[in-house]
Image: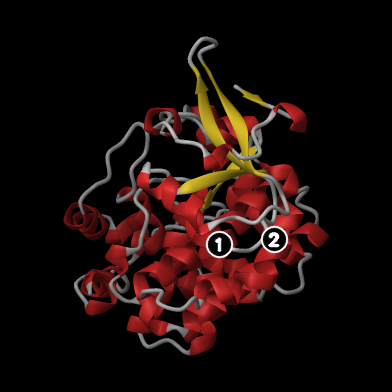
Amino acid sequence: MTKDSQAGSQEPHLLDKPLDRVSLRLDFNPVEMGFAPLSLQVLVAGRPAPVDLYLPIADVKRRRVEMKLACPQGKTFLATWRERLVRRGQRQVFVSLDQGPALMEYFDRYSDEIVDAPGITLKQRAVVVRELAAINLRLMFASDLTPKALEGSVARAQQTVERLARESQILTNLTAVLRSDYSVYTHSINVCMLAMAFGRYLDLPPGRIHSLGMGGLLHDVGMAQLPAAILDKPGPLNAEERALVRRHPVLGHRMLLPVGAVPYDVLMIVRHHHENADGSGYPDRLTADKTPYLARLLRVVDAYDAMTSRRPYQDPRPPFEAAAILIQAMSDQFGQDIVPAFIRFLGSPAFSG
């Protein structure tokens, strides 16, 4: 798989030509090519493209995928192009991770316009908020992970949580907006939204709900320091890989500690979201009475979303089956005080509409 880096050999008007549905719907890993997906819903039609926008095109003879330039940075992204892509079943373009700063500058400027566009439905607004959060996390993982680099990503995570807190309707009927295809990015956003809705169901104070949202977005940030081969592995992890993954709470806590904008409650969620009620969890083997309450709430939400998400080696479990597993493990893992409330939450309008 290659990235055509010579602007003269690319097709700057690719979107003006008929598109082959088969060529666009391909199974490949964009991260291996240095790209990230970008939902069409977060591009403002009629404005200059914030970065170069690419499409994956199959090179049948060479049996590989090439990223072809569809719209160069600065060229107006037309509404007709968006419509043509959607008709062909393509709801995303791809951007080079190298252009992350320019992309985030664009979102900093136009995020309110994107989310509050006239005629946008509640579900579309939720999807846009989710997609903006996803690209922020992708670019965070691709950054040098220094405190300075993390500050911008944390600030945008705070903006996401504040918007979700203001627009409470987004956190209702979550079954319609949660993504079931697992990645560390979609999982983190799912956990953020579920945790905030669960916190609201429990009638927690606004500040605690905000911490749950931030904790959900950032709880797996330590994964950014793990080898990419582990994050992208299409099958179950072996014992050595599992041992590395178990380090991510400590790594994430260590990464965020120098970032002043991260509240103490959020740091505790990041560090302790894998502790078990009986003290068998990690990293500090804390029992339920010693584990911060918000971290315990996120432990349940995290496990539920992981079980109900699709992975290359595992189909998603139905919600009732995941709930049954939580009940079976509530004494040793999740706590008998939290799981019953979470089960009631799953049956409430806050979750299922």
Pick whichever, 291 or 143, lies toward us: 143
Q: Earlier in the sequence, mark 2 or mark 1?
A: 1
| Badge 2 amino acid | Met
Instruction: State the image coordinates of residue 162 (x, y, percent, origin top left).
Output: 56, 80
Q: Which label sits on residue 45?
A: 1
Q: Residue at x 74, y 43 (%)?
A: 98
Instruction: State the image coordinates of residue 100 (x, y, percent, origin top left).
Output: 71, 51
Indicate the secondary structure of the residue bearing disc 1.
Answer: loop
Q: Contact (CB < 8 A) between labels 2 and 1?
A: no
Pick whichever, 293 or 188, lies toward us: 188
| Disc 2 versus disc 1: nearer the observer | 1
| Badge 1 amino acid | Ala
Q: Is residue 238 above or below residue 208?
A: above
Q: Is residue 260 visible?
A: yes
Q: Is residue 348 above or below residue 17?
A: below
- Left or right of residue 304, residue 134 in this image: right
The C terminus - image quarter: bottom left
Q: Residue at x 34, y 48 (%)?
A: 309
Q: Which residue is mark 2?
A: 104
Q: Residues within 10 Å of mark 2 (few under 14, many from 20)?
A: many
Instruction: State the image coordinates of residue 95 (x, y, percent, origin top left).
Output: 63, 45
Q: Residues within 10 Å of mark 1 (few under 14, many from 20)?
A: some
Q: Residue at x 72, y 50 (%)?
A: 73
Q: Which quadrant would residue 332 be assigned to in this image?
A: bottom left
